[in-house]
Amino acid sequence: MAALTDLTIAEAQAGLEKGEFSSKEITKAHISAIEEARELNAYVTETPERALADAEASDKRRAAGDVGALDGLPIAIKDLFCTKGVQSTASSHMLEGFVPPYESTVSGKLVDAGMVMLGKTNLDEFAMGSSNETSYFGPVINPWKRNSDDQPLVPGGSSGGSAAAVAARLCLAATGTDTGGSIRQPASFCGIVGMKPTYGRCSRWGIVAFASSLDQAGPMTRTVRDAAIMLQSMVGFDPKDTTSAEVPVPDFQAVLGQDIKGLKIGIPSEYRVEGTDPEILALWDQGIKWLEDAGAEAVEVSLPRTKYALPAYYIIAPAEASSNLARYDGMRYGLREDGDSLAEVYENTRAAGFGNEVRRRILMGTYVLSAGYYDAYYIKAQKVRKLIADEFSAAFEAVDAILTPAVPSAAFAHKEKSDDLLGMYLNDVMTVPASLAGLPGISVPAGLSSDGLPLGLQLITKAFDEETLFRVADVLEQSAGFTAQPGQKG
Amino acid sequence: MTEKNMIAGRTGDWEVVIGLEVHAQVISEAKLFSGADTSFGAEPNEQVSLVDAAMPGMLPVINKKAIEQAVRTGLGIKAQINRFSVFDRKNYFYPDLPQGYQISQFSDPIVGTGEIIIDMEDGESRTVGITRIHLEQDAGKSVHDMDPSSTYVDLNRSGVALMEIVSEPDLRSADEAAAYLTKLRAIVRYLGTCDGNMEQGSMRCDANVSVRKLGDELGTRCEIKNVNSIRFAAQAIEYEARRQIEVIEDGGTIEQQTRLFDSNKGVTRSMRSKEEAHDYRYFPDPDLLPVNLSEDFVEEIRRSLPELPDDKKQRFVDDLGLSGYDADVLVAERATAEYFEQAADGQDAKTVANWVTSDLFGYLNKEGLEITESPVAAGQLGALVGLISDGTISGRIARDVFAEMCATSKDPADVVEEKGLKQVSDTGELETIVDEAIAKGTAQVEQYKSGNEKIIGWFVGQVMQATKGQANPQMVNEILRKKLSE
């Protein structure tokens, strides 16, 4: 039998059911793995005692024959989710030591499903970043290394801790959140499956807000099936979040294993973005071929406004963030730095509490919303957003899913792009359009670069069609047969 | 001579132009975006939810009742109801604003243009345009006087639903502004959408005031913030108008400013100038979807509207035969109108109106009581008028009975019974008493016969004295005239 930490969710469920091991055993294996891999800095807060208590409770439930969908499975929670009684920091000094008296809806659903919580994973501060280097608690190290050198690589971001933890076997699965690519890009960098559901599938209640109109929780797992299993326990209308959708929830696993004969797969040429690694373009072509071999039909689609997505995103997301982060003022919770006047308390608190990237985005957001600039930036960006959504809708008249690369490059080294802001922002170029349109997307590990790093392909479907997304992703995963594992594991 | 509504200055007459923004707390059971309680008088920070305190990850959920109440208010002022409206964020930092933004409605308010008819003391009416009504959250309260070096914050009001009711700059005097506020308060009270209690802060008013020479362009305005009584609003406007006239006549110019009214000194003071004005960076709140109202939703509210003061007044005049003045007085407050209608049920409406506006109001004013606190219930006052109408007591005796009712809250019939105040209407008995009076007043009989008909009063007086005022005055007169003419 494989090591307990190497199991997929599906395998672990089967093993627990058959009594091959207990939740306590699989939990302990993960706790040890976490301890051994601390240099990855994947977790901000480890909760081993809570995990063992969760596991024991799960084993009792199992003995009594009363188990939930994820009962006894060791899972990590991105530290952007508020967790009752457990420090929730958003990887910011501002919220260091903040212990919420409430549980986010999504993490609460996972608790109800019986998960064992291993801890809270590291992320870019307030989910702002694509490399996990903006975390106040230090960068996360990607468990993968390139063949050519031994430099530590970034895991991507913002859900870098979750991606690294899943890849390095420090949890069976983890939650992520995706605003412009924060699940899909790190999934690609770390060789795992990262899935962003349709905006509104998951409740945002209790997730520290970055950009409210874009933020969406999703699963980060090692297989497509695991993503489907985990998503099932995360979704659903929440009366506490009026942007969550009151739509029927299908059985996401039901479509797995179905063939894709006759499905039309859209290939948008606009994703051949300048500067994209030729290896990635080659992998994309390979992906098209795999799907064709499986009976699907590849169809050229045109999404000409794609190039405007990134600029629009970097107006809308910071605008919302500048307002969402106004509540961190030192008055009620979190960091407070005193001063001689009210203005000084604000200035000192926010200067000390926010890192550079967060401050940069607050400034950009404040600027684009200010009098005289609002129409030129914010309103125009919203118009672009609408056009991009319309373009996708038109494309989905003709195709069932769209296949693109997930990222323009493989994982890069720490500090490699720290001074190249635009280069850093370009990481989201493939993922941002679907975010703006609120569409579901998934990154599936599809191959290795010549330097030995994982690369993902992205699938996008129309809103609330996660079934087609999983169905095609499943076939893509089978075809790719990606079995490589990172060198550094717990 | 200075024209009506104009203020005389050294350089001529000035017209005052006033627009009012009224913040009315919505009767909505809970806050605008959280389920927290909103009742008055709780201890500080007892009515604060996680949402009101802006904890990380908390989201607003619109209170449907507040939407309904805003629509009801809109319909009550005959306004356009916007079936599509949007909540925006108004961004600024202040300790009593936990989110760092107020959720309000900026470009797409829930209610569009409407009107309010104001009734002036001289009986004239004017129509004042309403620009819009929008919904917004209240902020918390900063408490500066508990500690010399610290400010305390009470978040009980944070998130409470307010309607901001914005008038056109149609008002031309402090009196008109006061009449507008009075009428608006009456309307929201009739509608049950705001309790209108200004002293408790449920209704507050910002006044935009400017002055100009008649026919000139609008002058630069100053905004007086947060006035919390109708009387203060009138005082503040009057002061501010005269201040502006003085500045201009002294050769100065008016600077656009936000000002505060000091009710102790009766003056307005500068709070901040336009240069210090905030850039609120309004944008649609991404946590809230736009509000889409169905036609059925609006129509259902329309069907459930109560009769409002203007219609009620018309009915009192047309159907009950009241004077316009009495009708105005009676409909001014919902509670008064309800009292009157209950008292007048089955009774002579004009008589009841007289009793309410003179005797009852007189007593309540003297005792400093609201009509809802009246010791005489509406039904009891109606019964008293009934006793007059059916001849059981005279109008004069009724006043004694009323005084006793005020003191004891007893039913008028019981007071009459206990005190033996029943009117003497027995013809035989009255004739005997009249005969006695005539026998006593031979000189007065002579005067009457020689044409001094007024002397009949002397005989009435005699009869009333003999009956302790309980003789039926109409019958006494008839019997006297008959006997004296014999």
Image (spheres, rainbow, N blue to C red):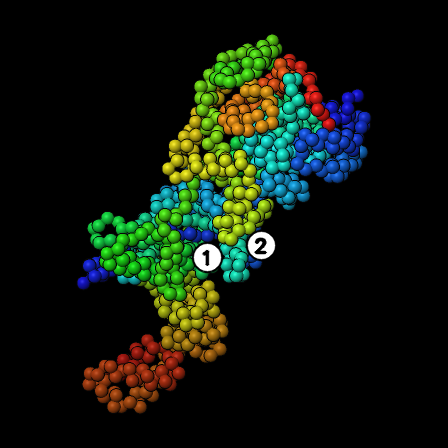
Q: Residue furthest left?
A: B1
The chain identifier of the residue carrying mark 1 reads: B
Q: Residue at x 36, y 48 (%)?
A: B275
Q: Residue furthest top?
A: A293
Q: Earlier in the sequence, mark 2 or mark 1?
A: 2
Residue B63's spot in the image, x, y percent? 51, 44
Provide the residue designation for mark 1. Answer: B201
Q: Residue at x 21, y 53 (%)?
A: B214
In the image, are marks 2 and 1 on the same chain?
A: yes
| Residue A282 position by quadrant | top right
Q: Is A169 drawn above or below residue B119 in the view shown?
A: above
Provide the residue designation for mark 2. Answer: B46
Which dot marks residue A38? Answer: none
Q: Residue at x 22, y 87 (%)?
A: B447
Question: Which image quarter holds the N terminus of chain A?
Answer: top right
Q: Secondary structure at mark 2?
A: loop
Q: Residue at x 21, y 61 (%)?
A: B10
Residue B62 or residue B311, whichever sits in front:
B62
Q: Secondary structure at mark 1?
A: loop
Residue B151 or residue B482, whichever sits in front:
B151
Mark 1 is on which residue type?
Answer: Gly
Residue A468's spot in the image, x, y percent? 58, 20
Residue A281 or residue B297, whichever sits in front:
A281
Residue A210 is left or right of residue B250, and the answer is right
Mark 2 is on which residue type?
Answer: Glu
| Residue B323 position by quadrant | bottom left
Q: Is residue A220 visible?
A: no
From mark 2 to mark 1, how far is it between C-alphas?
18 Å
Residue B240 or residue A345, whichever sits in front:
A345
Q: Is B318 drawn above or below residue B462 in the view shown?
A: above
